[in-house]
Image (cartoon, rainbow, N blue to C red):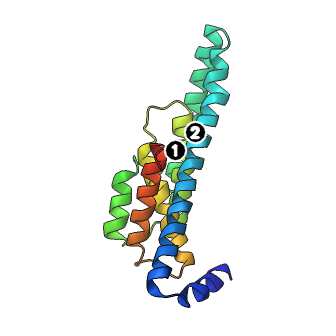
Amino acid sequence: MIRLRLTETLLRLPENARSLIQTAVLGVAAGLSAVAFLFLTNLMFSRTFLKFAGGSRPTFAVGSFVVIMGASIVVSALLHFVAPEAAGSGVPQAKTAYWKEMGHMSPRTTLTKFVTGVLSIGGGNSLGREGPSIYVGSGVASNAAGLFGLGRRERRSASVVGAAAGLAAAFNTP
């Protein structure tokens, strides 16, 4: 319903205006998803490790161990049972989607990458936030492009816009 109305409204606009609006909307959606990713990662870290740091050394050691192991187990289960294709840093997977799938990225994989990234990084595992931010931004933009009526194989430019927005958000740049 929303997709149909949005597509009809955009089709009435001239091509250059439609392209500009689509790019802006996709960039904002991807950037906000990357900002949410970073916010939740920092929130998880502050609610666990920073609280443990205020206690005794044994509390910090045991609490940290439990959080790291718990996050690792949950991430492993999600990657094994829900979306094995969400494994990896994110950049090679986004590039593969760009070339092999013409920019289409599944919503399930994008959401799984978001959740597993937050749990992994916020849970103390040694990963960078840039790769998952790029993947999530690219995936959100690719899926949002579907609301504009773009088919599965017509989302290359959307995935690039999303990847750029995700990278910019990961480095806190405008």
- Place of residue 155 in the rendered image (x, y in percent of width and height, measured from the top left): 42, 73
Query: In the displayed structure, would residue 154 be above or below residue 14?
Result: above
In terms of sequence position, does the residue under pointer 2 or pointer 1 come before the other?
A: 2
Which circle marks residue 126 in the picture?
Answer: none
Residue 72 in sight here: no
- Place of residue 14 in the rendered image (x, y in percent of width and height, measured from the top left): 48, 88
Could you say whether the residue bearing mark 1 is in a helix, strand or loop?
helix
Marks 2 & 1, CB-CB < 8 Å contact: yes
The residue sitting at 35% across, 66% down in the picture is 98
The residue type indicated by label 1 comes to Gly
* 138 and 14: which is toward the camera: 14
Residue at the far left in the pictured view: 99
Q: Quadrant of residue 38?
A: top right
Query: In the displayed structure, would residue 56 be above or below residue 79?
Result: above
Residue at the far bottom in the pictured view: 12
The residue type indicated by label 2 comes to Thr
Residue position marked by numbered label 2 in the rendering: 41
The residue sitting at 37% across, 71% down in the picture is 101
* 20 and 111: which is toward the camera: 20
Residue 44 in sight here: yes
- Place of residue 138 in the rendered image (x, y in percent of width and height, measured from the top left): 45, 60
